[in-house]
Image: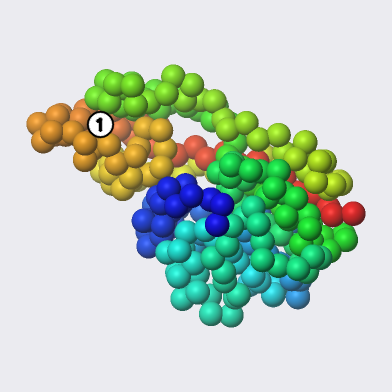
Amino acid sequence: MTQTEQSWQWYDDNAHIYEEMDPATLEFGRQLLAYADPPPGARLLDVGAGRGAVVRAAVDRGCVVTAVDAAPAMVARLRADFPTVTVSYMDAQRFDFPDACFDVVTAGFVLDLLPDREAAVAEVRRVLRPGGVFALSLPGPRPHRRRWQWLVDLAREFYPGAVPEDLDEQVDVNVAALLTTAGFVGWTRRDFELPVPIPDPAALWDLFAARLPTAVSAGWVDRLPPEREAEFRRRFLAGAERMHAGGGIALDRYVVLHRALAP
């Protein structure tokens, strides 16, 4: 493995509750699979399969599915949940597959996490047959970040230096250049928005306290002394209540889907 254990530690630790912590995961998997549009019987490889959002949609469509992930706990859950799927613990930057053995490769929210994206895309190209489809998703822009500025400010007050100033900057992934360098053709993209409603301030706190891997929610509450933790929670819930009364609480999720062909 060339990916470090630390890179995947959060996913490994939270494999048992990953989909519960991020209720948009299943819909994003369905959207990515629909964008790839494989026919029934297609040999499909899902890279960074996680808990199986894309795998589930591909199995339902009748694909012959292979799934890989670099987090051992995710692999174990995949094997238990999808007994008809071939599941392997594998580095996305170096596949243990022969050339031209898949009709479709999908990668949901994976490419931005990899230290060597060029190697990963080249590997996808290698294992795709001519005419095969590569479909991937990446986090999109966050135009409604200002609605959450109260939480950013609160986190900066209680955790000085922990929240980066460039919070709104996205991971820079030049997908067009990566695909072109690897030899792909016919690149297309589609932006997808999915607001995820949160029923009340208490439910938002539960998500925050569950250590979601975001810049303002990383299990920091555990790092506060008891009296500061109580104050943080009080002000968090007050801010969430104002948000709830002012139009409702929703996690604004934006995704960019990309699709290209192996010549």
Report the side of 153 relative to 178 (left or right). Answer: left
Q: Do we see residue 248 in this rendering?
A: no
Query: How many other residues sit within 10 Å of disc 1, few (<14), some (14-19) or many (≥20)?
Result: many
Residue at image location 36% in from the left, 56% down from the top: 13
Vertical placement of residue 97 versus 24, above or below:
below
Indicate the quadrant containing the N terminus: top left, top right, bottom left or bottom right: bottom right
- Horizontal side, residue 79 vs residue 29: left or right: left
Check the picture and name the quadrant holding the C terminus.
bottom right
Would you identify the image quadrant in which residue 66 lies? bottom right
The answer to whether residue 180 is above or below residue 39 is above
The spot of residue 249 in percent (x, y) is 39, 37
Q: Nearer the viewer, residue 46 or 27?
A: 46
Q: Residue at x 45, y 64 (%)?
A: 72
Whole-percent x, y for residue 19 in the image: 44, 57
- Asked which quadrant contains residue 201, the reply is top left
The location of residue 254, given as percent across then percent down, is 57, 39
Q: Residue furthest left?
A: 227
| Residue 254 shown left or right of residue 148 in the figure | right
Protein image colouring: rainbow
Which residue in the protein does label 1 denote?
Answer: 236
Query: Which residue is most to the front?
Result: 2
* Residue 3 in sight: yes
Callout 1: helix, strand or loop?
helix
Is residue 55 shown above or below 215? below
